Image: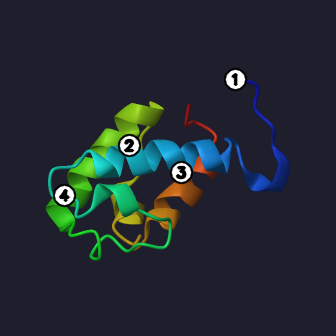
Amino acid sequence: MEREYGDGYMMDPTETAERIVRVIALHDHCKDPASITLAHTFEELGLNPLDMCEIHMAVEKEFDFEMAEDIVETWTTVNDFVEHVARDFYAK
């Protein structure tokens, strides 16, 4: 995949969103996985902090890079996750 560095994105945000939504939807505690949107909060999806830790690790594995836990803990919506990953140079 050839990277384009426009608008601060290192990856296609649409593709990144699809991959992250898929990871979240596969989690056992996610309410109504078929209707996940970028605007959903993790609380609305029925995810607690432990669930988010598991999703954090799954996203790291999906994109083959590491994210600082203290940054991830501040995110409240699916879009927060997508924006960070799509703008990270090391995500694949």
**Quick check: 89 left or right of 37?**
right
Could you say which is closer to the camera, residue 80 or residue 45?
45
Vertical side of 3 occupied by 23: above or below:
below
- The answer to whether the residues at label 4 and label 2 have Cβ atoms under 8 Å apart is no
Could you say which is closer to the camera, residue 34 or residue 87?
34
Q: Which circle's residue, 4 or 1, is located before the other in the chain?
A: 1
Q: Quadrant of residue 66?
A: top left
Secondary structure of the residue carrying tag 2 is helix
- Would you call the spot at circle 1 few (<14 residues within 10 Å), some (14-19), or many (20 or more)? few
- The answer to whether the residues at label 2 and label 1 have Cβ atoms under 8 Å apart is no
- The answer to whether the residues at label 1 and label 3 have Cβ atoms under 8 Å apart is no
The percent position of residue 80, horizontal first and vertical second, equals 50, 66
Amino acid under label 4? Asp
Q: For mark 1, what is the residue?
A: 1
Q: For mark 4, what is the residue?
A: 51
- Would you call the spot at circle 2 few (<14 residues within 10 Å), some (14-19), or many (20 or more)? many
CA gap, disc 4 and disc 2: 12 Å
Colouring rule applied to residues: rainbow
Q: Which circle's residue, 1 or 3, is located before the other in the chain?
A: 1
- The answer to whether the residues at label 4 and label 3 have Cβ atoms under 8 Å apart is no
CA gap, disc 2 and disc 1: 19 Å
The percent position of residue 9, horizontal first and vertical second, equals 72, 49
Secondary structure of the residue carrying tag 4 is helix
Amino acid under label 2? Val
Q: Residue at horizontal 50%, vertical 65%? A: 38
Amino acid under label 3? Ala
Give the number of marks.
4
Question: Mark number for residue 59?
Answer: 2
